[in-house]
Amino acid sequence: MAVLSTSPYRVLSKRTCSSFRKNSLSSFHPKGSYLFTLFNMKHYSNYSSDEFNSSKRRSRGPVMAAKKAAEGGKQEDGKYKHTVDLPKTTFGMRANSLVREPELHKIWDDNEVFKRVVDKNSGGNFILHDGPPYANGDLHMGHALNKILKDMINRYKSLDETTRKDLTPIKLRAKAAKFAKGTVKTQMESFKRYGVWADWDNPYLTLDPEYEAAQIEVFGQMAIQGYIYRGRKPVHWSPSSRTALAEAELEYPEGHVSRSIYAIFRLVTAPPVLGGILNEYLPNLCLAIWTTTPWTIPANAAVAVNAKLQYAIVEVQTLSEDASLSAGSKKRQLRNVLKEKKKPFLIVALDLVPTLEAKWSVKLVVRKTLSGSDIENCRYIHPISNKECPVVVGGDYITTESGTGLVHTAPGHGQEDYVTGLKYGLPILSPVDDDGKFTEEAGQFNGLDVLADGNVAVVKYLDENLSLIMEEPYAHKYPYDWRTKKPTIFRATEQWFASVEGFRQSAMDAIGHVKWIPAQAENRISAMTSSRSDWCISRQRTWGVPIPVFYHVQTKEPLMNEETIDHIKSIIAQKGSDAWWYMKVEDLLPGKYRDKASEYVKGTDTMDVWFDSGSSWAAVLGRRNGLSFPADLYVEGTDQHRGWFQSSLLTSIATKGQAPYSSVITHGFVLDEKGLKMSKSLGNVVDPQSVIVGGKNQKEAPGYGADVLRLWVSSVDYTGDVMIGPQVLRQMSDIYRKLRGTLRYLLGNLHDWHADNAVPYHDLPMIDRHALFQLENVVTSIRESYENYQFFKIFQVIQRFVIVDLSNFYFDVAKDRLYVGGTTSSTRRSCQTVLEAHLLSIVRVIAPILPHLAEDVWQNLPFKYTKEDGSIAEFVFESSWPASNKTRLSFPAEEVDFWEKILELRTEVNKVLEVARTGKLIGSSLEAKVYLHTSDARLASRLREMCEANNDADTLHRIFITSQAEILPSMENELTGNVPHTGECLIQGKTKVWIGVSRAEGGKCERCWNFSLQVGSFSEHPTLCSRCYNAVSVQHFPAVAMAT
Ligand SMILES: [Zn+2]
């Protein structure tokens, strides 16, 4: 959408037409990317450039007259200056947001406006349950996007009484630990500065005893239903923070390189079913495997093959040095086994033979082929422990995309390996401790760090023992601990799990009943939920909510049942979870176990933080006054499909059999304006705080205020990634100014307004009814977009409305009526009736997006706004959404069509006027008379009616802002011969209209600058036209009149 800088406020702004900056034109792309274009505007813009170029200079007459009057000019028109109604308002032209926004916050705070709005809620609730922002420091643009989106929804709902929904305060969600409380406070201050409204004095914190008890209850219900179990399974383990981690606590940074190796395991026996076909190779036949984690070789328990793949027994032949080089292979160090004279036969996937030849710089001669199922149950010697291990059939995860097609299987160190291990009853070896060091079980490697010297030692050992073919660096995605930013490992430990399998189907069914915005989010969460493995919920941390379990000292059997959980829950509800650590076992156990307390110890595991936040529906929605379960809406970033959206869904399904939300909105990430990720090193980080208050260099990074930031949030299609940068912000600031100017025009021209002045609808001129019809449609369409959370559509609609319909047309034409029509004249009052409707509607529909601007306008209203119930809305959010007006919408379809034609015609007339101006025939458009001819009899007749309209506002020359307009009955030369400038156009692509422009007839009216044959005919006011004569005669200007 294009932006331009025509000011509807030329009267006061001192801007002239030259301030129309063509190069500020740019376009808005609905997907959230901004296309900037100087010359190619037509291509990208939603509107033709004609619409923008219209009405630049035509209205200078009355405007200039008024301006001179305003400046107290010494010109002769000063005589009537006191009869001209200039705009007046206390509402500033500039936002001055650095001062004004905090002032407005103070007004809201001092008057407890948020509370007043909440208290007035008489309808049902709309519950937007706010998610878990990790209390981890200052806010970035992603927080701003997220929280402002939520605030826009909340504020809209607070205005929207007709659907009987109302504001429910956002509950601020924070994480445990004292550190968090401080961070929460800082974050709150920033959110407040964005203009986000919430029940800030009463946030919910996961470290509140009430919250913790609710969480224990959710856990207990899941345990009682058998969904919680203890098992020894490989989990993501962070040696750097000595705890298990959930998927959502991992990140996969760029640039991780592993030491990958090709190793060989020597076969010792083949099963009898093979009928001895391997015998000729056997003592010297090896399985070739590939791994990116050599440190897991000590835990190897099997080699897995894919039953459906073809495998080959190959003979290895070394290439001569020359051949090796000419083969183009990079110089790779041959490992010991390949230096041996007698090289082993190898088994590899047949498809990979050429790849491996190139990689190893050897020749591989295929001696025999076998299927994967043929080699199942062959046995090999473990290269380190020398134990016999089997070849097993794994799953479809074994492919020929990389490696050798044979997979080193360590069930203690991998999820797929674990599953295969279960099938074959393989041992779950995991000779690695909490610090990521080999244990005694790993023999000579005991004490070495698996991610460092342990890995090196294993590779060295394999090479020395003729089990290594090659080692090469391998770049791939590898999971890191999101907190310590250090690599993690996969390691089998005793952990508590939630059995997702037990309620997966219910979760999948529930997903189908939730409204996902955007719709494709449903696929994403479905895929993640259907494929996820059981949820490891225990963590080895000393902070957080404890897993309420006791272990028998001797048997290590866990003790956890309804009674023990209930007892612990009631303790934690009173004392908080710290009680678990400071109270004795005998006090933590319910009465009936107390005499056996000495046989038990407390568990030391805490719950996954995702279990904390995933219980928020239970701790908040079900408990707080005015809230109910399920929530209407959750809004978070797209990463929460595997995080909060999912953990909340799982806990809620397991205990309530229902999703905790009816709708879920996901938004994308914030990128810079080139679409690049923001990073300190690229220097492209946009900080929300400096957008609001400005950066160090105010020239380069001016403070735009919270509303400009909020306007940006509304402008983007947040369902994908969104972009922001200095150029985008400048553009937003221009649009903001445009909106502000529009509202200022409305305020200024209503300075003497009172509701009693309103003109009844059926007495309004057609131009006014048309304007109200457009307004009504705009309000309806904006409402629909709010309901569908499509804020970018609101942004587009309001912008188009303000620029095209109001600034370029209605306001432009209206100035004449407003300034010189006569203070109490029906033409001015009917125009004000329209302006009042526009002001009150626009200010309320933009309020959820631009609350500061809307409140600033409201505080400068020149009248009190009385609600239907007779109360006065002192603040914009005390008003309600503009009620839909059926009368306005009943504007007849043929009239709508006719006004479309008029507007198109006006654009064409302006082109001819422009030519006449360039040809020096006229200066201002008021110096012109327009002639029209069309052979379309119906159109001609309607236009003729407009030339003679009873209603001054509807007359055609006023709409063109010329002094006269005439419809010619024919194109005979005597009619058209003296018309110096002419043009032709096709209206609606089919109706031909001829347009002519000549100088206006008669003399120039001193007061309104229109030309009229009547100027000179009124003896009392010889310099006035009849309209101005009437206006001046009717109006009383006692003091002023005498003074002049
Ligand atoms: Zn006049």
Image (tube, helix red, strand yellow):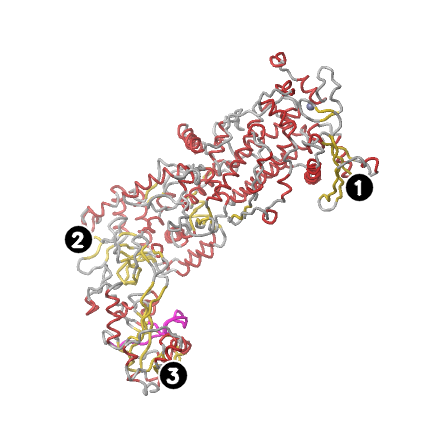
Task: Give ligand 1's quarter of the image.
Answer: top right
Can you tell me whether the CB of the residue at mark 3 lies under 8 Å from the nearest atom of ligand 1? no
In this rendering, the answer to whether 869 lies above or below 444 is above
**Magenta stretch encompasses residue 347:** no
Q: Which residue is mark 3?
A: 365
Answer whether labels 2 and 1 touch (C-beta < 8 Å): no
Q: Which residue is mark 2?
A: 596
Answer whether labels 2 and 3 touch (C-beta < 8 Å): no
Residue furthest to the front in view is 920
* Label 3 to label 1: alpha-carbon separation: 91 Å
Residue 498 appears at what percent x and percent y? Answer: 33, 57
Q: In this rendering, would 591 be left or right of 861? A: left
* Label 2 to label 3: alpha-carbon separation: 70 Å
Which part of the image, by quadrant, shows the C terminus? top right
Q: Which residue is mark 1?
A: 935
Whichever of labels 2 and 1 marks the residue nearer the N terminus, that label is 2
Q: Secondary structure at mark 3?
A: strand
- Predominant SS along the magenta part: loop
Q: Which residues are magenta?
A: 387-407
Residue 963 appears at what percent x and percent y? Answer: 71, 29
Whichever of labels 3 and 1 marks the residue nearer the N terminus, that label is 3
| Relative depth, front residue between 874 and 425 | 874
Can you tell me whether the CB of the residue at mark 2 lies under 8 Å from the nearest atom of ligand 1? no
Q: Amino acid at mark 3?
A: Val
Q: Secondary structure at mark 2?
A: helix
* Observer able to see residue 787: yes
Q: Amino acid at mark 2?
A: Lys
